[in-house]
Amino acid sequence: MDWNKKVAVITGAGGVLLSAYAKELASKGVKIAVLSRYIEHAQHTADEIIAVGGTAKAYACDVLDKENLIIAEDQIYRDFSQYHILINGAGGNIPNANTTNEFFKPEDSDNPNIRSFFDLDSKEIEKVFSVNFLGTFLVTQIFAKRMIGVKGATVINFSSMAAKSPMTKVLGYSAAKAAIDNFTKWLAVHFAEQGLRVNAIAPGFFLTNQNKLLLTNPDGSLTERSHKIINRTPMRRFGQVSDLFGTLTWLCDEEASGFVTGSVIAVDGGFQAYSGV
């Protein structure tokens, strides 16, 4: 595939994983539209790409603001003429959408320091569901229209291990990512006759800015939850960003994965395959 003729639109590209995606594709010659809620984060990623000879432009974009998305899409189309790859990376978890403990005990309901299932605020669940699922839905709705009938056009969503097997404590995020899996398959069928492929990548456990406090102690050592994850991961380590690059480029390349659509590809060191015994 001639990567130099491709343009990729990447949301959430100011974060650790998605900025790495942007830089990896740019290193192959893909032109990158870097989208982030905060323009300074998007600009930082774009500047890093430009500094090594790549082509990128930063855009401020709120994935839950349809009017903002329409404006951003129009500007990107005018800047690049056409785009071929859409990566829906914006998302994340919200601590208030989690319970404090893995398992419920009746006395938790009377403890003000513990957030049980019965204490969860529906508005917090709605927030985390919105930024993950609705943010993917709206971006795809606005950007996919110009991708219909375009050779090699592909949409890549971001799923999670929590989609198939919900993580303890993490209610809102797990439910939202399960919705992403379902949405990916629905879209793949809906647009199959138009040549638009839709797939998702489901990363295993990677250390990022969002989960660092959950997975590491102040001294840098691993938390009890981290040890549980490592013990359930047959390869016995956290993922490294570079572990995702092969799957990413494969899904972007219509010559390599042109008959792949509606798939959720796990990159997890065997986590989903391991029963624990």
Image (tube, helix red, strand yellow):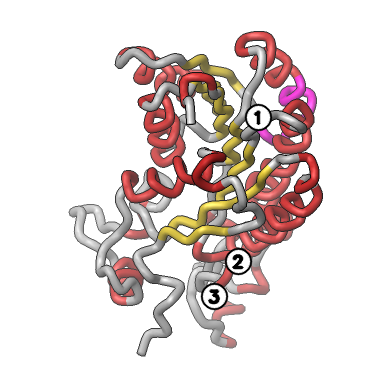
Helix, strand or loop at disc 1?
A: loop
| Circle 1 or circle 3, nearest the eye | 1
Residue 257 coordinates in the image, percent (x, y): 54, 48
Residue 227 falls left or right of residue 87: left
Q: Is residue 103 magenta?
A: no
Residue at mark 3: 111
Answer whether residue 65 is visible to the viewer in this image: no
Residue 93 falls left or right of residue 126: left
Give the residue type at disc 3.
Asn
Give the residue type at disc 1.
Asp
Q: Quadrant of residue 222?
A: bottom left
Any mark on residue 225, and which? none
Helix, strand or loop at disc 3?
A: loop
- Residue at the (76%, 31%) spot, across then down: 149
Residue 230 coordinates in the image, percent (x, y): 29, 70
The boundaries of the magenta stretch are 62-70
Give the residue type at disc 2.
Leu
Label 3 near label 1: C-beta < 8 Å? no
Q: CA distance from mark 3 to mark 2?
A: 20 Å
Residue at mark 2: 171
Residue at mark 1: 62
Looking at the image, tell me whether mark 1 or mark 3 is earlier in sequence order: 1
- Residue at the (71%, 40%) spot, across then down: 196
Q: Quadrant of residue 193?
A: top right
Q: Is residue 65 magenta?
A: yes
- Residue at the (72%, 40%) spot, across then down: 195
